[in-house]
Image (cartoon, coloured by chain):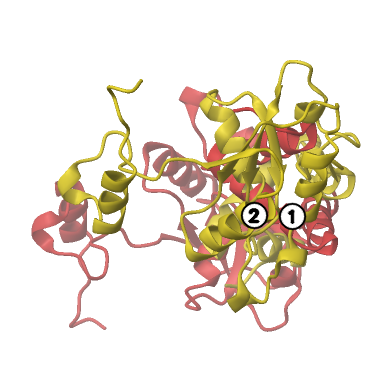
Chain colours: A yellow, B red
Amino acid sequence: MNFPSKLIEEAVTEISRLPGIGKKTALRLTLHLLKQPKSSSQTLASAILDLREKTRYCKICHNISDAEVCSVCESPKRDNALICVVEDLPDVIAIENTSQYNGLYHVLGGVISPLKGIGPEDVHLESLIHRVKHPYKGVKPEEIILALPATMEGDTTAFYLTRKLKDEIVKVSTIARGIPVGSELEFTDEVTLGRSIITRINYSAE
Amino acid sequence: MNFPSKLIEEAVTEISRLPGIGKKTALRLTLHLLKQPKSSSQTLASAILDLREKTRYCKICHNISDAEVCSVCESPKRDNALICVVEDLPDVIAIENTSQYNGLYHVLGGVISPLKGIGPEDVHLESLIHRVKHPYKGVKPEEIILALPATMEGDTTAFYLTRKLKDEIVKVSTIARGIPVGSELEFTDEVTLGRSIITRINYSAE
């Protein structure tokens, strides 16, 4: 593609580096920006700069944060007896958007993957053990909920964590694996369906 | 959607202002930027800023340009006897990418639209007349090719321009309207098919 201006070419090149955005879309966005008032380009540019330069990570749960300790860890409304362990930030956002969870989080920043060379020391596991022993607000956690991906790596991490937490007087659970709400039995893969039978929920006991 | 950080929220809001990008895509892009090295956010931000602040418009053809006169108008390789009149910048890029045209351009910056209140004085029509009378490099244009949209507004602009250029000794032509290459007759709309019969090309005369 030929561009009449180096500046346009640069903007298109940079924008098309983003995932899922090709040259054509990048050109469309560039031409859109050109037609907007200067202030909108400035706000966009500064939001991108601030995002990368000013964001910090919570020293307790490693979630992204505007301060040293994130709003979830700091909040007096959250249940300090629950810690939900997740792989990364999008998982926190996804769980928060369900409005079904009111405890704390612990963001590992990855999962153990021997194939990719990611060991237990490369993710925030030690700080979780430390948190269980020495809670930030003094409230001992009662349950650690593992909300890790349903993959080999996720399971490895879950297994490692369960063993590490064996000596602490804390319950370790995992989020349910089963058939998604609204889906048909016949179209569900066998592994998921098999698991959902094994980990069935006893209605009469409730 | 809830965000754990104001900075993420701002970035998502700003990115989702772009056309065709919703909140979910914006969040995906934001999280991607967070994982990239700082330098890539900086290059992206400065490309966006430079684009809006440094781009200039060619004083001859109103195309976007890095200097006072654009590279097309300045080039010694382009045919100064041809001027192609287009509505806006994307049209220049589209024609340039065909590699079928080697003349100059004239970017109107819009088309006459009485309904939208855009009159002849709101688009760069006067400067085209001026260009024909006083060419930038002294080479009198021989042909003005109208490459305007095939709409009411495009036709109005073409009609106005043809009348304005009546007194100049210059040929005025328009790009062909007809059946797109690769398409079937039966699926072409009647207006296009009708026009393509009226404006048929005489093979024996070539």
Q: Measured from the top left, where is residue A156 in percent x and y?
A: 56, 63
- Circle 1 sits on which residue? A125
Whether residue A112 is visible here, answered yes or no, is: yes
User: In this view of the protein, which residue sits in the foreground, B34 or A191?
Assistant: A191
Q: Are marks 1 and 2 in contact (CB under 8 Å)?
A: yes
Q: Measured from the top left, where is residue B48 in percent x and y?
A: 77, 52
Tell me which residue sits at (85%, 27%) in the image.
Answer: A138
Disc 1 versus disc 2: nearer the observer: 2
The extreme left residue here reads B186
Quarter of the figure with the C terminus of chain A: top left
User: In this view of the protein, which residue sits in the foreground, B134 or B64?
Assistant: B64
Q: Measured from the top left, where is residue B193 in percent x and y?
A: 16, 55
Q: Does dot 2 land on a helix, a strand or a loop?
A: helix
Tell me which residue sits at (64%, 54%) in the image.
Answer: A161
Near mark 1 (Cα within 10 A), the count class, few <14, some 14-19 or many ≥20, is many
Q: Amino acid at mark 1?
A: Leu
Which chain is indicated by disc 2? A
Q: Earlier in the sequence, mark 1 or mark 2?
A: 1
User: In this view of the protein, which residue sits in the foreground, A192 or B13?
Assistant: A192
The extreme top residue here reads A77
Q: Please indicate whether residue A47 sits to the left or right of residue A114 in the image.
A: right
Quarter of the figure with the N terminus of chain A: bottom right
The tag on residue A161 is: 2
Question: What's the distance in space between the residues labelled 1 and 2, CA to CA?
Answer: 8 Å
Q: Amino acid at mark 2?
A: Leu
Q: Please indicate whether residue A197 sits to the left or right of residue A4 in the image.
A: left
Q: Decide: is A110 above or below A186.
A: below
Whether residue B16 is visible here, answered yes or no, is: no
Where residue B174 sits, quadrant-wise, is bottom left
